Image: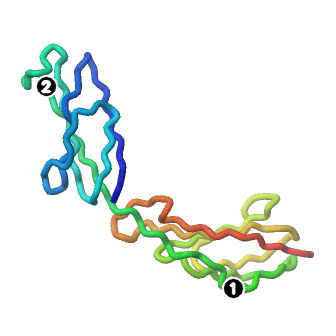
């Protein structure tokens, strides 16, 4: 897994922190340390880990009666897998369009993932946006247009965590002549 999490604590009234203890999903001690804050843990697997810290009164740091513990669950999930590379299937090769013409783009790849696309004139806002593997647009004006398709996987494996690795983007320029 290699998921790194940084834990910090803040005490009131001058309490001192005792040990950090991290319990693995099976309940065993994964790590125990007297390090202060921040406390960095690299989780080796998925599951729910219990992170505990003990605070003691500065007047009686050796006496358990003057200590209290705090506990939080840290859920570690698999990252979502990267969608397959994206490519432009149609039109291939990309040619210059003409004003008023309609162009249909068909994108390959991006699985697993949800495809979304946008087509914008480089001088202004969005001409059109949509989802799916096919985009169809009529170009009202001459100029250069930015065509961008993005695949985002938030579903595989089940209950995964979206990271940059779960996103792929393909962009290219479409020239439109009068």
Compared to residue 54, the image places residue 93 above or below, namely below
Q: Nearer the viewer, residue 26 or 133?
A: 26
Colouring mode (rainbow / by chain / secondary structure / one colour): rainbow
- The spot of residue 121 in percent (x, y) is 79, 64
Q: Is residue 68 left or right of residue 132?
A: left
Quadrant position of the C terminus in the picture: bottom right
Q: How many marks?
A: 2
Q: Is residue 118 left or right of residue 39?
A: right
Q: Is residue 52 left or right of residue 166?
A: left
Identify residue for label 2.
67
Residue lying farthest to the right in this orientation:
178
- The spot of residue 77 in percent (x, y) is 32, 59
Helix, strand or loop at mark 1: strand
Helix, strand or loop at mark 2: strand
Residue lying at 72% horizontally and 62% vertically, measured from the top left: 126
Q: Residues within 10 Å of mark 1 (few under 14, many from 20)?
A: some
Q: Nearer the viewer, residue 126 or 39?
A: 39
Instruction: Kindly identify which numbered label has been placed on residue 90.
Output: 1
Label 1 vs 2, first from the N-terminus: 2
Residue 48, quarter of the rendered image: bottom left
Residue lying farthest to the top in this orientation:
59
Residue 1, quarter of the rendered image: bottom left
């Amino acid at each position: 897994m290699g998921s790194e999490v940084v834990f910090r604590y803040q005490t009131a009234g001058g309490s001192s922190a005792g040990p950090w203890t991290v319990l693995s999903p099976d309940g065993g001690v994964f790590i125990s340390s007297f390090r202060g804050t921040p406390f960095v843990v690299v989780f080796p697997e998925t599951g729910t880990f219990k992170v505990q810290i003990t605070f003691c009164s500065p007047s009686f740091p050796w006496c358990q009666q003057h200590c209290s513990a705090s506990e939080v669950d840290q859920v570690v999930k698999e990252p979502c897998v990267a969608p397959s590379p994206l490519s432009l299937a149609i039109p291939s090769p990309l040619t210059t369009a003409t004003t008023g013409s309609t162009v249909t783009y068909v994108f390959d790849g991006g699985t697993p993932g949800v495809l979304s696309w946008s087509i914008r004139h480089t001088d202004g806002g969005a001409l059109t946006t949509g989802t799916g593997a096919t985009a169809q647009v009529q170009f009202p004006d001459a100029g250069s247009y930015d065509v961008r398709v993005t695949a985002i996987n938030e579903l595989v494996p089940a209950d995964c965590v979206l990271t940059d690795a779960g996103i792929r983007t393909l962009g290219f320029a479409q020239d439109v002549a009068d």
